Amino acid sequence: MPSEAKTQKRLWRTREDPLADIWKEAEEMLEIPELESKALFDYLCEKHPDKLLENHLRTFQRRVREWKATKGPNQEVFFPQDVTPGRRMSVDFTHMNALEITINGEAFAHMLCHSVLSYSGWEWASVCFSESLQALKTGIQDALFRLGHVPEELWTDNSTSATHNPSKTGDTAKRSFNLRYLSLTEHFGMKPHTINIGKSNENGAVESLNGHIKRRINQHLLLRGSRDFASREEYDHFLCVVLNKANNLRRERLKEELKHMPELKASRLSEWDEEQAVVRKWSTVNLAKNVYSVPSRLIGRTVTGRIYEDRIEIYYNGELQLEAPRLRGRGNTNINYRHVIHSLARKPGAFRDYRYRQEMFPTHNFRRTYDQLEQNCSPRLADMEYLRILKLAADLMQSMVDEVLADLLAKDILPRWSVVEEFMPTVCHDSPLDVTIENVDLSVYDDLLKEVR
């Protein structure tokens, strides 16, 4: 048969070699390891426009591949590893912004702290907002308590959440574990390990699944028909469902792996840092190098701030006084106008140069209202009128005042305080219903037992 006939490889050319004049020069430049064939081709085209054309690119790239295979430098070799059940769990952070997830229509910028068992591929992920130690602690504990068992080793990269550079020489190759991270691994009985710097392939179990989990979530979002969630809790539940479906496919290998892992007996560690601070006379407190406003009744008192990864809680004498979203970075402010408006309304002259003045405009309609008052009233009167409106929002309901302001601005009516108060809807407080609960006669149960017998 023709298919069984031995064919001899053709050793002659059927057309003139278009690279004959430049190939020797190209070989000399290919000794540079990082140089790509496309960049070299563009360089040679500019240098020898009479010898190379754009349609020679594929021929040039093929010739470069052949040269690298026969004469090129040795490449890095990767060595397959035998994975021991129950030995290793890897943890890494991955950004989720590319999936364009929203909460109530607003972009939800976040990350996932992703934990993976190397043998079975079982995985878990927790929402976080930075690569901090708090986020790492939460992610690891969520995975361990979901799993109910403890692996022998915990692997991470060299991020500052787990390691630091103890030397002042700038030698980044020598990094040590943070003491707080060591206490975390010791508490759960795991041995901490890190990969070599710049060698993400050494953490391949989680690195590869970072892409898989985002593709899986994206597919479920497409099936869901929407990327918007009503609340953070709804989104967390969605992630839980997606991860459980993925782990169901690995349940057989997980059963085998769990046989080699001790059960989790350690208690869950606190996932916050505590700071003591004195509330200043401006009704603010400094926590984690950012400024938060607090109720003015706490001025001069020492409060305790619990700093979580996503929020802060402020306690006085063990009682929760305030909860607010945590600010990122340093020198940022979170001022709630409700904490200061009653004093500010009595001192309207302080408003114009108030350091946190921009925080006193909770919505766009409040900002437009102040602008209208400034255009039609004296500066002092505009400040007084606006502060009275803001106090009205604090005493009643901000959303109701906002609707009235939007309506007045749409009708081109100057939103003076008296006008806003006049247009405010009447709030009705229905009296609670009187409910009478009769005493229950338990003897009917005795009669029921007699009938059963």
Image: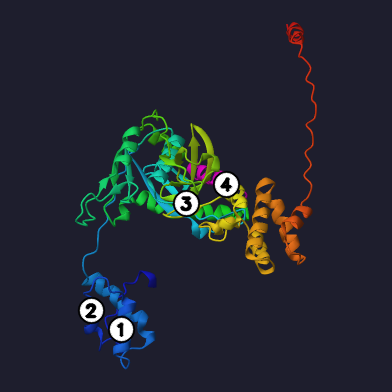
Q: Are marks 1 and 4 in contact (CB under 8 Å)?
A: no
Q: Are marks 1 and 3 in contact (CB under 8 Å)?
A: no
Q: Nearer the viewer, mark 2 or mark 3?
A: 3
Image disc number at residue 339: 4
Specify whether 401 is left or right of 163.
Answer: right
Q: Are marks 2 and 1 in contact (CB under 8 Å)?
A: yes
Secondary structure, mark 2, is: helix
Q: Earlier in the sequence, mark 2 or mark 4?
A: 2
Quickly name the residue at label 3. Answer: 327
Which residue sits furthest bottom? Answer: 50
Q: Position of residue 13 (x, y in %)?
A: 29, 85
Quickly name the residue at label 2. Answer: 29
Q: Residues within 10 Å of mark 4 (few under 14, many from 20)?
A: some
Q: Earlier in the sequence, mark 1 or mark 3?
A: 1
Give the magenta-colored segment's residue range. 229-249
For residue 106: magenta? no
Q: Quadrant of residue 271?
A: top left
Q: Earlier in the sequence, mark 4 or mark 3?
A: 3
Cα separation between marks 1 and 3:
49 Å
Q: Nearer the viewer, mark 4 or mark 3?
A: 4
Cα separation between marks 2 and 3:
51 Å
Q: Position of residue 416 (x, y in %)?
A: 72, 59
Q: What's the residue at 26%, 81% (across, down)?
A: 11
Cα separation between marks 2 and 4:
68 Å
Q: Nearer the viewer, mark 2 or mark 4?
A: 4
Image disc number at residue 43: 1
Q: Earlier in the sequence, mark 2 or mark 1?
A: 2
Specify whether 318 is left or right of 163.
Answer: right
Please name the predominant secondary structure of the magenta segment in the image: helix
Q: Nearer the viewer, mark 1 or mark 4?
A: 4
